Structure formats: structure tokens, C-alpha cells
Image (tube, rainbow, N blue to C red):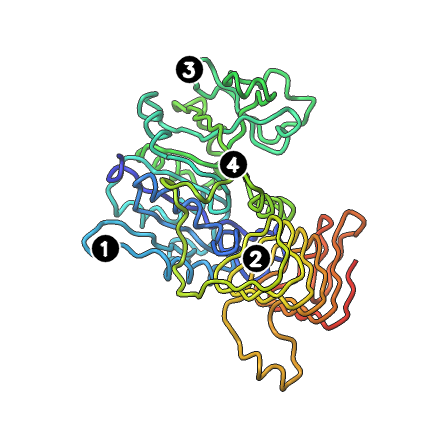
Amino acid sequence: MYKNQVLAIILGGGQGTRLYPLTENRSKPAVPIAGKYRLVDIPISNCINSDITRMFVLTQFNSASLNRHIKNTYHFSFFSSAFVDVLAAEQTIENKNWFQGTADAVRQSMRHCLRHDFEYALILSGDQLYQMDYNEMITAHIENEAEITVGTIPVTRKEAPAFGIMKTDAAGAITTFVEKPPLDQLAGLNSEVSPEMQAEGRNFLASMGIYVFNREVLVKLMADEHTVDFGKEIIPQSISGYRVFSHPYEGYWTDIGTVASFFEANIDLTREKPKFNFHLRNQPIYSRARMLPTSKVFATEMNGAVISDGCIIHAKSLTRSMIGIRSFIGRGAVLENTLMMGSDFYEDVDALDQQNAIPMGVGEGSVIRNAILDRNVRIGKNVRIEGGGHLEDREEEAYVIKDGLVVVRYKAVIPDHTVIR
């Protein structure tokens, strides 16, 4: 609809400390989700489904795996203007600094963006889970004669202090922006929302970190090198000088900001009717096409299990668990409330047996509850890992306990008979 008028700019995120140790070796958008995808696949797929096919992904921290995933995944026709290109942080003669914030990342990348013709810049986060038709937001932006439009989601009073909260007038123009207001300062910040949102007590409009800018406005705002962040500086400072509008979104949306929120988003996908639907015919989520065999399951009781391609499973039971690509689970193993990210390759199990080594996957008789197993982990036989609220946060060489979850690190080895609980 607006294919030739819009350029999408997807922010690759910073250090992602709240998602550590999942971000120890990769950026937030590169974190695997739902067994076979990466977080960055979500905004890219939303763009493709909205027929927005010119995208830049701005990267800086731990970006190698993200760059590799994008290079191996998104290919368009040679006869098309479509592209998904990585713009890595770079030092130039004029600028020796790395990205200092979301706005600064766009500012430093503007010389590449402005080589393309576009009327509107669509700025997105690379680490959120939602399905949106961006055409609706751009249409509203044009109809409102807006210069900046902010994607917003109605939230409750309890949730409001975690977000940037905007108050709008009857036309939807943003009149006030307060970054993470405490509960005692929420009076008067509620906005007009739909009857459905009112019934749920969601009367406050929170920023989703999704923006539409008119080209000339973005260029002008990026000229001020003292502003480095959209949410904290650009948007609040623009309200008085520009036509800034809210575009409310009432579907499912979550910011994958913490280990707990990441885990909950994945485990919710094991429900019969999850909040995020990967099965929508007209809104598919795209990812890297792998030539993997179908999975094999032997004598396993399953209830709420999502199993990705190429797995070999002999487990006793799988309950509310997400099993990633190429996963191996041994006989008698029990997984409950577990996210297993899988493996990057197959290995010669016979050779490992001769070496008496622990293979990738979960060994025979092991019990795993309330845990995240990162890629390429090796869990030995008869291991017990039982996360829960009784555990205090701590960091070990092979695993980290965070928010009651046991997160086994990338490539970590857990020896036979180990107990973590």
C-alpha cells in the first residue's frame, strides 16, 4: 500500500543486560524464540506482511549472529527494490563514537538511509513480540496530517510506571509525555480509550517504541546531536513543536526485556490458544529455511509441548515445554515448564559414546523444571534442575539463576547426577 513511500529502520538493541545470560554471546534481536525463530524475525515479518520491503537493521553489540541470520534468511528477487540490510555501528572521520542510544543510532545511520527515496520512516524495535499491520498506522499518520506518530498500547494503572505514558486530546494528538511515572503521579494522565480497554482498566497509553516520522522532520530532529534517545528526549521535546499523534494498538504486544518475560512469552505459546498466534494464514512469521528432517518421538507423554524440526525425543514426558530445532532428549527424561533452544548442528553420537562424552541435549533420566536451556547445551544423565521462587539469584560457570529460572548457558556442560534446586 505504501511500499515505495516507507523505509523501515529496525533497532538492533543495546547490551541487553536484563536478558543476560541469553545475551552473553548474541544481541537481543538474535535470541532464539518459539523453537525455530529469532526475535528480529517478528518486526521483519510484520514489515513484509505490510508490504514494506525496504529495511535497515541497525546493529552494534554482539552482532555477529544477528548479521549472519539476516544474511542467510532474507533474500529478494534481483528485479525487486526490496532489501533487508544490516547497518553496523561504524566509526568515521567525523564521528569516532559508537551508538549512544536509539536516536543516536538512527542519526549515525542517516547518511545511508537518505540514499533512498522515502516519505515516511518507520522506526521499530528488534526485540518485541506482536503482529501489526503497519499500513493502518501510516494511514492514520497521513489522515491526521501528523509529523510524528507514536504506536501506543493501553495499559493498566499498575503497569503504567514501567512505560513512557502519553496523554492525548480528543483527536489523538499527544499533549503530555511522562517517562515511567510513579503511581502517585498518574492522576490526569489517563486518555480516552475504547470501551473494551476501559472495561479491562487499561486507561493509560504506553509507548510501544514504534514511530512514524515524516522524512523532513526526522532529518531536522537528527541534526541535534545532543539528543540520543527517542523515548526519553526526541518524543517529549517534539510535542510542543510538531504535530505528534498516538496510534493505539489493542492486540497482543510484549517487550522482551527480561529473562522472566522472555520465558513467559515462550511458554505461553504451548497453550491451546496462545496470546501470540504463529498460525495466522495472512500474517506468517518468516525465518531461516532449514532443510531439516521431521521430528521423531518415541513413547513420550506430551501435554502442551511444541516440538520444532529435526528433533529426536525419547522422553518420559513433556509438559508446557518448547523444544527447539535438532533437540535430543534421552529415555526417561522429564521436562516441565522448560524452554529448550536446541542445537546448531548434529553430532556423531557413536563417536561420543566411545569417548564417554556427554552429547548435546538432555540425557537419560534427567528431570528439568522451570528452566531455559540455551543452544548446544549438554545435560548429562540423571540430572535434576528444578527452578522456582525458592531459588535466590546467583551466577555459576555453567548456569545462572534469575527470577527463579535456571538458565543453562550457551554450550554449557552439566555432568551426570548434577542437582540444581
User: Mark 2 or 1, which is nearer the eye?
Assistant: 2
Q: Which residue lies furthest to the bottom in this view?
A: 354
User: Mark 4 or 3, which is nearer the eye?
Assistant: 4
Q: Residue 171 carries which label?
A: 3
Label located before the other in sequence (1 or 3)? 1
Distance, label 2 to label 4, CA atoms, is: 23 Å
Please name the amino acid that badge 2 sits on: Ile
Q: In this view, does 296 lie to the left or right of 182?
A: left
Q: Name the residue under label 2.
A: 323
Q: Mark 4 points at which residue?
A: 253
From the viewer's side, name the closer residue of 96 and 13: 13
Cβ–Cβ below 8 Å for labels 1 and 4?
no
Q: Mark 1 points at which residue?
A: 77
**Residue 200 spot, x, y in % from top left:** 59, 22
Establish if 277 lies above or below 87: above
From the viewer's side, name the closer residue of 396 and 277: 277
Res. 136 image quadrant: top left
Cβ–Cβ below 8 Å for labels 3 and 2?
no
Distance, label 1 to label 4, CA atoms, is: 31 Å
